[in-house]
């Protein structure tokens, strides 16, 4: 009887552990200087859970895999030319266009890195849908923002999304849900891609 009870207990335990998802929550928060932080435990009451499972992240707001290597050659050349991390450029492309070189936003942003018409004109782009030209120009623009905001990556990303004037106005990531979500998504993908290299 004790043996049967032991076996039943083991079976029940296995069933319980089978259905419990084994993953860690990752919390994010943005400090007063506009820097995005990641932690495995909440630091403040207003922290938001950004990721529960890696599988959830890779499927949210996207249709292509995070690790698509289709444009790696162009990304590598841009990373080398402008001293911007390969994984960061790739993360931005994932969030901006989901690797669709023909993407056009409602605001008229075009291509893989969603270049705005003003930047297309300013940088003398011939074909914004050409992957190489788009990635090189988008990375060059990001580099200029990175320098403008003294190396603060979160602010540079916010400026890429909302425009540098908005970031300067608030002297931090603007209080726009779209921009804050954009920064979080890019930074999250950036961290994941760095680990996969």
Image (spheres, rainbow, N blue to C red):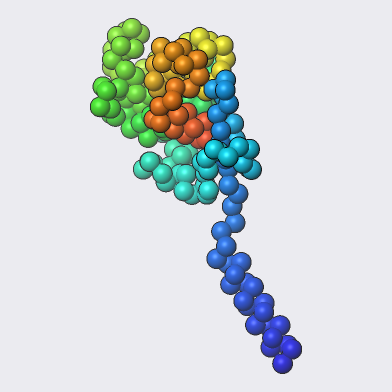
Task: List the single residue furthest toward the right.
Answer: 2
Check the picture and name the quadrant holding the N terminus.
Answer: bottom right
Q: Quadrant of residue 94?
A: top left
The x, y position of residue 103, in whole percent, is 29, 29
Q: Position of residue 181 (x, y in %)?
A: 44, 33
Residue depicted at x 52% and y 31%: 187
- Count of labels shown? 0
The residue at the far front in this view is 45
- Kindly tell me whether residue 147 is visible in this rendering: yes
Q: Within the image, what quadrant is residue 83 found in?
A: top right
Q: Is residue 65 above or below residue 130?
A: below
Question: What's the residue at 33%, 32% (across, down)?
Answer: 100
Measuring from the top left, give residue 165's x and y in whole percent.
Answer: 41, 12
Q: Along the line of sight, which residue is nearer the eye, 118 or 67?
A: 118
Which residue corresponds to the image point at 46% horizontal and 39% vertical from the top-left? 66
Question: x, y percentage for residue 63?
Answer: 36, 43
Q: Nearer the viewer, residue 104 or 136?
A: 104
Q: Which residue is at a point 33% across and 7% down the rendered structure image? A: 122
**Is residue 77 in sight in this rendering?**
no
Relative depth, front residue between 158 and 140: 158
């Amino acid at each position: 009887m004790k043996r049967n009870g032991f076996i039943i207990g083991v079976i029940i335990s296995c069933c319980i552990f089978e259905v419990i998802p084994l993953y860690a929550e990752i919390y994010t928060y943005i400090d007063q200087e506009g820097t995005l932080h990641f932690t495995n435990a909440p630091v403040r009451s207003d922290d938001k859970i950004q990721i529960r499972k890696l599988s959830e992240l890779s499927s949210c707001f996207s249709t292509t895999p995070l690790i698509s290597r289709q444009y790696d050659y162009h990304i590598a050349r841009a990373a080398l030319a402008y001293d911007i991390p390969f994984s960061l450029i790739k993360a931005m492309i994932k969030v901006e266009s989901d690797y669709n070189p023909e993407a056009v936003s409602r605001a008229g942003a075009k291509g893989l890195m969603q270049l705005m018409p003003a930047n297309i004109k300013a940088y003398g782009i011939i074909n914004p849908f050409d992957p190489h030209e788009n990635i090189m120009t988008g990375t060059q623009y990001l580099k200029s923002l990175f320098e403008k905001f003294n190396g603060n990556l979160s602010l540079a990303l916010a400026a890429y999304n909302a425009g540098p004037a908005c970031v300067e106005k608030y002297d931090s990531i603007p209080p726009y849900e779209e921009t804050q979500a954009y920064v979080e998504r890019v930074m999250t993908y950036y961290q994941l891609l760095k680990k996969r290299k």
